[in-house]
Structures are given as structure tokens and as C-alpha cells.
Amino acid sequence: MKAVWFTLFAISVAVGIWYVASRLTDLMITVAICFFLAFAIEPAVNRLAARGWKRGRATLLVYVAVIAGATLFFALFGRLLFAQIIGLTSNAQALYVELADQVESSLGYTLPAPDFLLENYLDDVVRFAAAEVLGVLSSLLLVLFGTLTVLLVTFYLVADGPRFRRVVCSVFPARKQTEILAIWEVAIDKTSSYLVSRSILAAICGTATAIFLLIAQVPYALALGAFTGIVAQFIPTIGTYIAGAVPVLVAFGASPAQGIATLIFILAYQQVENLTIEPRISAKAMELNTAVSFLSVLAGAAVLGPIGALLALPFAATVKAFLSTYLQRNEVVESHLTRLDQDDETPGLS
């Protein structure tokens, strides 16, 4: 009888935990974002603190530096960038018509006419927009509140980092405390390295793409360059394909020669980046096998959606680095199944 009551109690607890967790999904996403940002900026704060700065002032200085950098960027390029984005959006139908003409003349395939697409999908778009307009103000307020919440929580996680870690460690015995602090340090290192390396690669990719599109006289070169750099580096797995497809389609809308030239440039740049630029910049950032990275992104997206996909790689790299430290490694027997080529490298498995 006791076993029956114990089973019912365990089931009730499990259902209760599941219910509470489902209700706290948004909060868990917010907390994950806060920890990600805290890990990313803590190395800079730690360096300032080592020079005698109080952590609160050091964290505030990092915030001000990031905001000042973003403000300077938009002051220099924002007007032109937004003008090109608006122009690209407003001329989407004209670009589609030009692209359809190019496809029909080159390949003999007729794309659906814009009027046909509008007739079939305009009603759905209008109904969707009408429903969404009512919630625009509340959505903006929620975004503003969420942004302020993330910034505030991240600030205190960094400014009071040592105190927060002392509280966490005080719950565990000394041996466990050492392991927890080791994991924490690895998480900070991997997250900050990931964000810095991705930002540098995005700047290089966006600049190179924008320069090429300007030389090739492809319209909206600056907007397309910024889009390509950000999407290719910060959207895991599929970002590279999306980032390359958009400028190629816009270029084909201008002329087949520009489209082919842009396609060749995108493919060539990806090879150059993968073989030379990325290994130098992010060699120590992730150190993950490609298959592990892909599965990590899928798992992160399944658990937390797009945010989970973004956070999956730093998390997987942290787990991998921790396991590499604590797992005992043995000599591998020689076999044709384990034999490597002379130039073969297996990042993430070493």
C-alpha cells in the first residue's frame, strides 16, 4: 500500500514540476540570455577589476562602451543602411519581376506572376496583419520591458559575480565547489570567445561582401553586406545558405552576369573563410566536431527555440571542454578504422 501511495506522490510531483516548468519557459529563456551575456562581458570586467576598478563601475563602463560603439556605427552608416533596407523592401515586387524575367529567358521556366501570388496570399497576409496591428503597442512594450530586464539582470550577474558564485558554492562541499568554479570559468571563456570570434567574422564577411557588391554595382550593397555578415555568422547551421542566397537573388534581379559573379564570390569567399580566416580566428573558441555542432543546434532549438539554437554551441563547447579535462584518455590502438591522414584534423574530438 505504501508503494502505491509513494508512486502516486511521485507522479503528482512530476506533473507539478512539468506544469511549473511549462509556465516558466519564457523566464528560463530570459535567464539563459542573461547568463550568456554575463559570460560574454565578464572577461572585460575582470580585467578592469584587476586594475583596481570596482565591479559595478567596470560593468557600467562595458555597457557604455558597447552602446557608444553601436551609436557610432549607426551615426556613420545608419542613415544609408536604413535607406537601402527600406528601398530593398519597397522594391521587392520589382526585383521579383526582374528575377522572373531572367529565369524565364535563361532557363525557360516561368515563375508565378506577382498578381497570382497576391491573389492567393494577400487575404491571408491582410488578415494576419490586421490581427497583429492590435498587438503592436503591447508587443513593443513587452520587448522594451524584456530588454530592460535582461540588461538589469545581466548587470547584477556580472557586477556581483563573485558574491553570487560564493552563494552558489556555499551549498556544496569544497571538492564540488572546485568543480563548479572550473565549469563556470570554462563557460565564461567559451562564451566570450564565441561571441568575439563571431563578431569579428561577421565584420570581415559583411565588409568583404559589401565591397564586392559595390564593385559589381549590385543594388543595396551595404544592406546586403550587413545582412550577409550577421546572418552567416550568428544563425547556426542554415545561416550561411540564407545569407548567401539573398544577395545572389538580388544580383540576378539586376542581371544574369551580376548574379553569376555574386554567386561565384559567395562560394569562393566561403571556401577562403573556412580554410584560412575562420580557423585562425576561432581555433580556440569552440573546438567542436561538425556533427556535434549540428546536433547541438538541433537540440537547443528543440528545447528553447531560436534562442536555444544560438546558445547551443557555447554550451556544447563548455561541456566538451569540461569532459576533456576530467575524462581519462587512453592510447588508441592502431587500426584502419582509426588511421588518420597526415593532414587530417578532427576539431572537437582531440
Image (tube, helix red, strand yellow):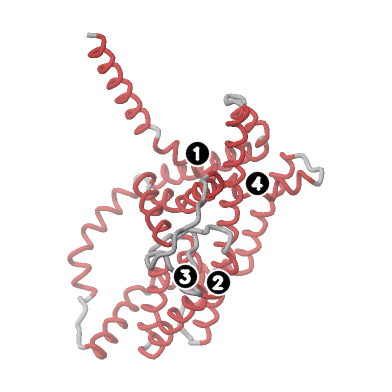
Q: Earlier in the sequence, mark 3 or mark 2?
A: 2
Question: Is residue 120 toward the left or the right of residue 278 in the image?
Answer: left
Residue at far right of view: 52
Q: Which residue occupies 31% across, 77% down?
A: 96
Q: Earlier in the sequence, mark 3 or mark 1?
A: 1
Task: Tell which tag, 4 or 1, sits nearer the viewer.
Answer: 4
Residue underneath mark 2: 80
Whether residue 216 is situated above or below residue 289 in the rendered picture: below
Residue underneath mark 4: 42
Q: Amino acid at mark 3?
A: Thr
What secondary structure is marked by label 4? helix
Q: Earlier in the sequence, mark 4 or mark 3?
A: 4
Task: Tell which tag, 3 or 2, sits nearer the viewer.
Answer: 3
Whether residue 8 is situated above or below residue 190 in the rendered picture: above
User: Mark on residue 228?
Assistant: 3
Foreground: 219 or 236? 236
For the N terminus, the quadrant is top left
What secondary structure is marked by label 3? helix
Residue underneath mark 1: 31
Q: Earlier in the sequence, mark 4 or mark 1?
A: 1
Whether residue 172 is situated above or below residue 240 in the rendered picture: above
Q: Amino acid at mark 2?
A: Leu
